[in-house]
Image (tube, helix red, strand yellow):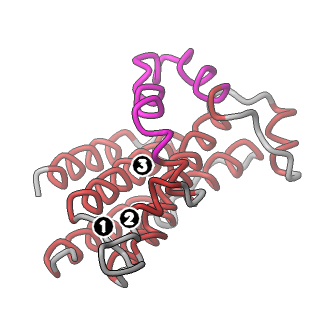
Amino acid sequence: MLTDNELNAANAYGEWLRLAVHERELPASQRVRASAGCLAIAQDHHHAIVVLLDSRLYASVLALVRVAFEAYVRGEWLWLCATDAEVRRFLKGKEPPGINLLLEALEKTPAFQEQALSKIKKRTWNSMCGYTHTGGLHVQRWITADGIEPNYSKEELLEALRFADIIASLSVLGVLTIAEDDAMAQKVLDRYKARMEE
């Protein structure tokens, strides 16, 4: 449903983001491994979303949106908020606090005090959950007058891609913050602004 130009641009942007942090040297610590691992997974979900869009596997595209958002939030929380004990427990397989507690802690830090993530969650969480967990909202996209088949609008697919672009960009910025590379972070911001104008 997306044009070749739109898919090519999405692939190019994802690859540009990947190269922005590829083989980036990071401090060696459990906190960095946990945080950067989550941020890298959020980027990986972005790549998967683009591949799935190209393959016209739209249900999975929409299911991954929430997963990417959570990976990003967890990565930032692990970097900025988690105690050393929470980082150790996370790396041993223990689940972190729920999303509301993660956001509450994150938004007490200077970088997130505008509460943009909570606003995103408030506006989109129910639909993200519905798509991830095969709720009625998602099933509606498979019921047509003629049968059971994908019936997504191009607008909602582009919205999912743009949201994934945002999360991937923020994830790269998170890694660059860990690496203390302000110059590359500015390049990512500039490239992101250009992407939003495409």
- Please indicate whether residue 161 sits to the left or right of residue 46 in the image: left
- Disc 2 and disc 1: Cα gap in Å? 6 Å
SS at circle 1: loop
Instruction: Give amino acid for label 1.
Output: Tyr
Q: Judge by depth and name the residue closer to the eye, 50 or 147.
A: 147
* CB contact under 8 Å: marks 3 and 2: no
* Residue 134 in the figure: left or right of residue 85: left
- Classify 114 as above or below 183: above
Neighbor class of circle 2 (other Cα within 10 Å; few <14, some 14-19, many 20+) is: some
Q: Position of residue 76 (x, y in %)?
A: 58, 37
Magenta range is: 101-127
Three-letter amino acid code at disc 2?
Arg
Residue placed under numbered mark 3 in the picture: 167
Answer yes or no: do the residues labelled 2 and 1 have beta carbons within 8 Å?
yes
Q: Which is nearer the eye, 157 or 27?
A: 157
Using residue 132 as the reference point, say whether residue 185 is left or right of it: left
Q: Position of residue 44 (x, y in %)?
A: 51, 66
Is residue 189 depicted above or below 114 in this figure?
below
Q: Residue at x 42, y 49 (%)?
A: 167
Q: Is residue 5 above or below residue 189?
A: below
Q: Residue at x 17, y 81 (%)?
A: 4
Residue matched to label 1:
152
Q: Earlier in the sequence, mark 2 or mark 1?
A: 2
Q: Mark 3 packing: few (<14 Cα in 10 Å), some, or many (20+)?
A: many
The residue pinned by badge 2 equals: 141
Q: Give x and y (percent) for residue 185.
A: 35, 44
Write the residue at 34% across / 56% down: 160
- What is the spatial separation of the Cα atoms under label 3 and label 2, in whole angstroms? 24 Å
Q: CA distance from mark 1 to mark 3?
A: 22 Å
